[in-house]
Image (spheres, rainbow, N blue to C red):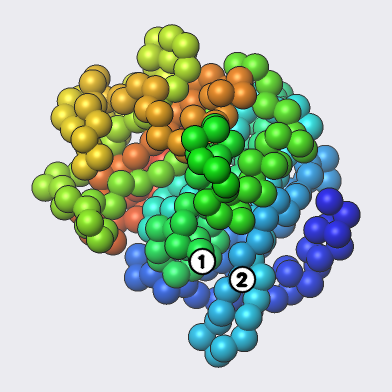
Amino acid sequence: MSRLKIRTASINQRIMEIENTQAHDSRPSLKEIYETWEELLPSTWIKRIIATQKLILPNGSVTTLPIYAYYNSSEVDTILIGGIHGREPAGTVALTKEASYIIEQGENRSMLVLPLMNPWGYYNHVRYGPSGNSVTDCMYALGRDKAPISEESEKIVDFFVNEIKVMKGAAVLDLHEDPGYEEGGTPYKETGTYLYIIGEAARSHQIVQQVKTQLQKCPLPLINCGMTRFHEVIKDGMIENSPDGSIDEFLSVIGATPVLTLETLLLSETSPPINARVNVYQQVIRSFLQ
């Protein structure tokens, strides 16, 4: 842990060189994301590098991108996650825009915020990390694979196992998007939102109901029924207890409930516009924390 803290200053200095991304959806740069959290985080919170990724810049130089965890207690009852997949930026942007509100809410709860889980993917506008694999796959941790699929996933699981305690009944919100236009995807004809939920009696949990109510009245309304491009049945806007080997399933196994994963159907990189998606996600964050 100490070695990672010592490296923070030099990493931050190099990140300040990253002005843009490779995406074309007007998302903030990595520099803007990191700077916002750096400026707003109070001294009572901990900033921890839990993994890193190498990025080759357009000028050929190589920099190191940190994956930060921000938390105000070693035992947490509220977890917010964004940016696992680089083609799904709305979660990262919404969490960053709501950073002041989130930190304010931390005065009355024990919180962990992971706003940018895949900075390399965010910069390059690709789903996975530099290895070509998921940065948070937990099949190994769940006993279904012989080895971790990526260096990031191994280190992120290690953080949850050895460095922070997820309290029983901790609530989790993981902000994703569903880019049906990506390679191998099935393009959608209409947009909207849906939820994955995990946990005992999660469907009737107060937090789930709060988020569901917010989505039902938002400009990207909840899809009541249908099927995802992964052939999962949506019932009343939700998919329950999906055994997908994700960080969300892993967190539920170690005690978190409810675990909510929000998805928005994307028709293209810019449809719906990123600002519209971010606005919806900001309201969802507030309904989750109310």
* Residue 227 visible at all: yes
Residue drawn 57% across the image and 88% down it:
60
Tell me which label, 1 or 2, sits earlier in the chain.
2
Numbered circle sitting on residue 267? none
- For the view shown, which residue lies furthest in the front direction? 146
Residue extending farthest to the left is 189
Per the image, the residue denoted by label 2 is 54
- Is 104 placed left or right of 87 in the picture? right
Q: Is residue 158 above or below residue 18?
A: above
Q: Is residue 95 left or right of residue 23?
A: right
Q: Residue 200 location in percent, x, y?
A: 47, 11
Could you say where residue 218 lies in the image, as x and y percent from the top left? 29, 34
Distance, label 1 to label 2, CA atoms, is 8 Å
Q: Residue at x 73, y 68 (%)?
A: 12
Image quadrant where residue 44 sits: top right
Q: Residues within 10 Å of mark 1 (few under 14, many from 20)?
A: some
Which one is in front, 42 or 47?
47
The residue depicted at 65 percent of the width and 17 percent of the height is: 168
Frontmost residue, 113 versus 198: 198
Residue sticking out furthest to the bottom: 59
Q: How many neighbours does mark 2 have within 10 angstroms: few (below 14), some (14-19), or many (20 or more)?
A: some
Which mark is on residue 130? 1
16 in relation to 168, above or below: below
Question: SS class of the residue under badge 2?
Answer: strand
Q: Are marks 1 and 2 in contact (CB under 8 Å)?
A: yes
Going by the numbered disc 2, the residue's amino acid type is: Lys
Q: x, y (%) of residue 135? A: 53, 52
Residue 117: tell me if it is visible.
no
Q: Residue at x 28, y 36 (%)?
A: 193
Amino acid type at image mark 1:
Pro
Give the secondary structure at mark 1. Answer: loop
